[in-house]
Amino acid sequence: MTLLRVRDLHVAFASDRGMVRAVQGISFDLDEGEVLGVVGESGSGKSVAALSIMRMIQQPPGRVSATELTLDGEDLLSLSEARARELRGARMAMVFQDPMRSLNPVLTIGRQIVEVLQRHLSLNRWDARTRAIELLEMVGIPRAARRLTAYPHEFSGGMRQRVMIAIALSCNPKLLIADEATTALDVTIQAQIIELVKRLTRELGTAVIWISHDLGVVAGMCDRVNVMYAGRIVETAKVDELFRRPSHGYTLGLLGSTPRVDGVAHDRLTPIDGLPPDLIGQSTLCPFLPRCQVSVPACQGSMPPMRGFGALHQAACFADLA
Amino acid sequence: MTTPPAAAVTAVSAVIASEAKQSPACMDASSPAGNVGTRPTRHRSATDAAPILRVENLSVHFPVRHGVFGTRIVKALDDVSFDVPRGITLGIAGESGCGKSTLGFAVTMLQKLTAGRVIFDGTDLGQLGRRAVRQMRRRMQIVFQDSAASLNPRTQIGAILGQALDIHGLCPGRQRTPRIRALLDMVGLAANFADRFPHQLSGGQAQRVAIARALAVGAELIVYDEPVSALDVSIQAQIINLLQNLQRELALTYLFISHDLSIVRHISDIVAVMYLGRIVEFAPKTSLYAHPSHPYSRALLSAVPVPDPALERARQRIILKGDLPDPTNPPSGCGFRTRCPIAIAACAELAPPPFPVADDHWARCIRVGEPATVSAPGLSP
């Protein structure tokens, strides 16, 4: 069952230097319970795309358009602000990189969880409190009942992110978007959080969009992966297929740039030369062309369209890498 | 060869420092290596077998206020000792709060030591007077994670590099401009970057400028504190390759501090794993990654994701319980025992000394060598 449908999503921002085209026509589906990874570097549009799904792009200065953007059949673009607020938290939720900026520093953890439960589930105070304790226990916070009265600064980074996950999952949303949710955490804590999210979303049947720059995390976590570059999805595939047969010059470059802790592959990294492009103005050629190691003559002619490289595997690349 | 007396080495360094003040150092500014390439080799003849850096029983303790009247002590570094031979990279791996940055500061004289000694090229840094410290600083430089923040926003890149030369009285007059151009070229930046301001640089470019500044004064030891952690993967790889090239060309010694064990594996020759102010395992890279012997190293390695879905599914993770303990109130005995999957009663009694694992490989764990603990390597599925 398709949960989220995105067709030709564009997001642009007005700036002094002209329109910044942060997302340039992306399309994808997300099934119920599916875990979709989104990888790409800073400025590739992965966060902006996620925020526009959450209806969290302020317009103006932003401008969001799409031929279709639906969650469970409901059009997200034409929602009233009041209805959008009802959906956020209840049907779709998001966890960010820095939990300290998502949590209110002057309110207790308990109050911040209870608030969500009262708002969306109309629980009375006592029931909300009981449920809040259950949620904190669910995400592995010891002595949960006593921690309700603690403030965010009394928690470690990993514990705060657990609280954010508890809040995000409190109303049993159908879609969870995690934007670099483990990037700021230590690797042993990251492993704890990933295990937690994997287990909980599987139990609850939540679909996940997991945004990360870390190919390793995506490899261990996701069913399918979208690779983004300069506001576009340049490759999409099942996770095994993507790592076995990367079919876009950029994906290949990312893998070549990534050192591996198991020491497999390269003695020397093969970095991607140059810098990502400016997103102002329209490009007519592949945005990765100036940095590409595998370009072919056709790249000089036109923008490569998405083409198939196997079942559910598509890449916008003229070169045949396999 | 035996270690020459410290005084003799200081004399040698003083001679070389005065040489560097004269222009010969600038004459080959057109060659990519510049003056920095020649100096270490000259030094090497004097101290070949001795390590360029020796750290002995180094401790750095910070007082922290506790309650209204009390203070407690945080042992940011506790009894840390190691040697670094010239021309190699020592990777320092560990998570936040393990003391790895404090170690970088202590080694480069940016942090007062509570106890212990740092010996650079035969000279005990604690014994140096102010002038001598300044001369020594030229030979040991540090590069931080956020280099944009360590560049004066109102100064052009050329002038930033020029200031570094001025402070140490290097390369005055007409050789200045070609020298700066050569430095920029060494780090892969075009000559016109000399006219740019820091805000016009990307993260990777700012990091290149910081490296150029360290090279400008002829550093022999460079401490990198999370130098690529804020960069995108593709830019990260560019900088890593640059560091490796420079090391090969200039015979530099690196202390590479990072939380990222994949990068540490990639760049290091020897690796120290730190936890709660102590080095818990120390080994040549291949030995450490093949046979991690401290339970913390094993957990750490098992937690690092690998970009290989099949391998990821098959891997057994050692998921540690809980968080780092309160550093003002660390556990008795072994600092790791509260989270350790193989802790026994004896672990609470005594801080474990280094136990040998293999040649040049030791771990601070009393269970090293027990067959039951060796059979759980961190990386293999």
Image (spheres, helix red, strand yellow):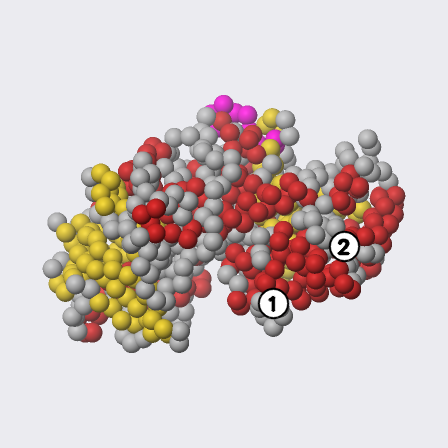
Secondary element type, mark 2: helix
Is residue B92 among the parts visible in the rendering? yes
Question: Residue B338, position in %: x, y?
Answer: 49, 43
B210 and B29: which is toward the camera: B29
Is residue B337 among the parts visible in the rendering? no
Q: Chain of mark 2?
A: B
Amino acid carrying mark 2 in the image: Cys
Sequence order check: which comes first, mark 2 or mark 1?
Answer: 2
Secondary element type, mark 1: helix
Question: Residue B263, position in %: x, y?
Answer: 51, 43
**Above or below, B157 relative to B294:** below
Residue B364: within the magenta? yes
Q: In the figure, residue A106 lies in which quadrant?
A: bottom left
Q: Are marks 2 and 1 in contact (CB under 8 Å)?
A: no
Compute the Cα span from label 2 to label 1. Answer: 21 Å
Kindly identify the residue that appears in the image at 40 percent across and 48 percent down: A292
Question: Residue A18, position in %: x, y?
Answer: 36, 73
In the figure, is residue A234 to the left or right of B154? left
> Which class describes the residues within 10 Å of circle 2: few (<14), some (14-19), or many (20+)?
many
Question: Which numbered circle lies on residue B26?
Answer: 2
Q: Which residue is mark 1?
A: B195
Residue interval drawn in magenta: B361-373
Amino acid carrying mark 1 in the image: Asp
Kindly identify the residue that appears in the image at 58 percent across and 39 percent down: B268
Q: Name the quadrant of the C terminus of chain A.
A: top left
